Amino acid sequence: MEPALPFGPIRGTDKGDSVIPKRLPISSAALVPVGFAVGLAACTAVFPQVGGHAVVRSSFFAAAAVLALGAALLAASASRRGRSLTIQTEIKTPHWLQMCAQ
């Protein structure tokens, strides 16, 4: 019998929830957060509210740089240790109260 966790089960539950794991090569997995970083940096060119203010623009570039640096550190750590990276999609059935609220 598994011990009860205060935050619920990690894997799918008995209600039909499922977890779909997808193993990615390290180079592909590192590109996911880099894509988000590029999106953040592109917001400075697309939205004039962001690109027009120097402080906001530099904040977006700083956030993109930190995200890209974190992705590079993750990729370096995973390749050094010989680990593979996994993205998991967890499909959960909504609670009845959540369905009514939406």
Image (cartoon, rainbow, N blue to C red):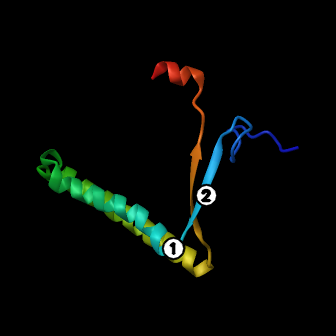
Asked which secondary structure carries label 2, the reply is: strand
Q: Closer to the N terminus: mark 1 or mark 2?
A: 2
Location of residue 81 in the rendering, given as x and y in whole percent from the top left corner? 62, 78
Residue 98, compared with residue 15, is above or below; it is above
Location of residue 6 in the rendering, given as x and y in whole percent from the top left corner? 71, 37
Residue 43 or residue 28, whichever sits in front: 28
Label 2: how many Cα within 10 Å (few below 14, some 14–19, many 20+)? few
Instruction: Inspect the image, locate mark 2, and give the three-letter code of the amino acid beneath it.
Output: Pro
Task: Residue at the far right: name it.
Answer: 1
Q: Quarter holding the N terminus?
A: top right
Residue 79 or residue 19, whichever sits in front: 19
Residue 86 or residue 17, whichever sits in front: 17
Residue 97, compared with residue 2, is above or below; it is above
Q: Give the mark toward the camera: 1 or 2.
A: 2
- The residue that disc 2 covers is 21
Asked which secondary structure carries label 1, the reply is: helix
Question: Quarter-wise, where is residue 92 in the image?
Answer: top right
Location of residue 64 in the rendering, given as x and y in whole percent from the top left corner? 32, 60
Instruction: Inspect the image, locate mark 1, and give the three-letter code of the amino acid beneath it.
Output: Ile
Q: Quarter holding the C terminus?
A: top left
Residue at 16% across / 48% down in the picture? 47
Q: CA distance from mark 1 to mark 2?
A: 15 Å
Residue 102, compared with residue 10, is above or below; it is above
Label 1: how many Cα within 10 Å (few below 14, some 14–19, many 20+)? some
Residue at 41% across / 68% down in the picture? 31
* Mark identifier at residue 14: none
- Residue 100 left/right relative to 36: right
Residue 67, compared with residue 17, is above or below; it is below
- The residue that disc 1 covers is 26
Location of residue 2 in the rendering, given as x and y in whole percent from the top left corner? 84, 44
Residue at 47% across / 72% down in the picture? 73
Residue at 79% across / 39% down in the picture? 4
